[in-house]
Image (cartoon, helix red, strand yellow):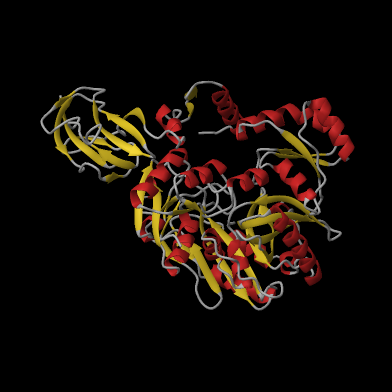
Amino acid sequence: MFEKVLIANRGEIALRVIRTCRELGLRTVAVHSEVDADALHTRLADEAICIGPADPTRSYLHIPAIIAAAEITGADAVHPGYGFLSENPEFAETCAQCGLEFIGPLPEQMRRWGDKVSARALAKSLGLPTIEGTELVEDVEDAVKKAEALGFPVLLKASGGGGGRGMHILQSKEELRAIFETARAESRAAFGNDALYFETFVERPRHIEFQILGDKHGNIQVLGERECSIQRRHQKILEEAPSVALSDEARSDMSATIRRAMGEAGYISAGTLEFLLDDRGELTFLEMNPRIQVEHPVTELVMGVDLVAEQIRIADGQELALPERALSPRGHAIECRINAEDPDTFAPSPGTITELHMAGGTGVRVDSGVYGGGRVPPNYDPLVAKLIVHAPTRAQAIAKMRRALSETLIGGIRTNIPLHQRILAHPAFEEGRFSTRFLDELQA
Amino acid sequence: MKLDLDQLRELIRLLDESNLTEIEVEQDDDRIRVRRDPAPVAVVSQAVAPTAVVGSTHASGAPAPEDDDGNYLTSPFVGTFYRAPSPESDSFVEVGDSITPGQVLCIVEAMKLMNEIESEVAGTIVEILVENGKPVEYGDRLFRIETT
């Protein structure tokens, strides 16, 4: 086993990794930018190295600085967290070349799953039910031809996009002609890549994702699903496990399919397969995220696992301890992402946290990267804390989350806690009747 | 001031398509300025290639704000600090030496790449703050310099 892990990230996920490392007896190295000199991950790691200025391209995304920090501290493994360099195959390769164990999938697996069009083709060849889509389009005439073959309405997507950015719903070829060049220019500006393609547009889907773990011995474990339909502009803000929309039979069928497919693919480490669930109950594969996800704690609570510890054991070459029967979820878990933003306008609200009281009590977990008196810098994403609850039933989990949110006090910055309370109190949410359109309709 | 999002988007696109680093528009009492950080210096992209076993690049120290007790050259990289080009060589500078802008004062090694760190100012070395061979972080003070 390696002895010292460098965490190439910041905020709550850096702290999340530090916690597991400490429990496993591993020493930790935090890296931080100048504005994060007093951040919690910087303070709680065994060692901390300043790697650059606030601009992430010169610090958290700057591969040579992170490698140099590992060199001067003698770290022998790197955990990338999520975001930043977590899905960057060059980073994983550089780590390997420098003798550092990268705690994540192989670089070629990131490449294979990172490109959306090739990932869909790969999933299909592995026997996963896959959303209908096209190859990359060449020009506007080719786009019209491909869209008509697929059938309107269609979703125009940017190959380099992600997190829901660069998507357009199109009802007709006239709409397509009108927007095509703009969409291409947007994609080029936002992702440095103007490759576009189409997918079938599903009217009111749910977003369901399955958590998997794969070891270096060819074993795959599927750890059930997460329901992530509560999104704002395609950004998830509240997640739960299990999903009310999936029967035990549907869950175990899809788990078996995924286990077979990903076993064939030889996937290593933690990963998430994202699906759309349509109103006929059909799951179709969208994409695969080769990393730990923000919302992983809901799976940890209902499945009784520590996914970061599993990632570390897998990187160390240990075999997954597979249970005799497929795991099934115990109870219900909900996560609320608490963002530093105005609950009405969603404008970012960075600043100094003047007072902080996080919720507690039975069945409440807090994953946070902030503290009272600490700063939320304007340079990074607005996630300040994740509040996660676990209870025997969904109704009890909702009641527990409402209670936990009500005792969470964060002063000095604005947060989206009032929005979470509105969602949790909504009859459609309580009854489990919702799609990815829920928040748009709530605010309309 | 009233912020027109479309205007702002247009400015960002203009900036993106150009080689400019900054655009400023002034109209009546309103002023909008969009700027991007300058592209990373060459050394950054060179250093990405770990196959370069020993290379040599030049960089200036990170901006060193002057404070009460003088001017500092700070480390622009995280890495290992060396006062000489090789273990057998003399140090680049000693306390009391006069220095000129562009003169190499030390090396910070990161990923087997020897980054020569140059002075931005003319002056005299007053103090050397890091021991040869020790690790340094981004922004660590390396030399105190009395400017002339």
Residue at 27%, 42% in the rendered image: B140
Left or right: A54, with A142 as reference point: left
Q: Is residue A55 visible?
A: no
Left or right: B83, with A235 as reference point: left
> Could you say which is closer to the camera, residue B105 or residue A184?
B105
> Could you say which is closer to the camera, residue A219 or residue A403?
A219
From the image, which quarter does the C terminus of chain B lie in? top left
Which corner quadrant of the image does residue B115 belong to? top left
Residue at 67%, 46% in the rendered image: A113
Q: Position of residue A98 (x, y in %)?
A: 44, 45
Furthest-left residue in view? B96
Left or right: A37, with A274 as reference point: left
Q: Position of residue A303 (x, y in %)?
A: 63, 71
Residue A26 higher or lower than A154, as above or below: below
Query: How many numbered badges does the structure rendering display?
Result: 0
Q: Position of residue A177 (x, y in %)?
A: 81, 28
> Could you say which is closer to the camera, residue B139 or residue B33?
B139
Which corner quadrant of the image does residue B81 belong to? top left
Residue at 71%, 72% in the rendered image: A326
Q: Position of residue A59 (x, y in %)?
A: 43, 42
Left or right: A102, with A232 as reference point: left
Q: Is residue A348 visible?
A: yes
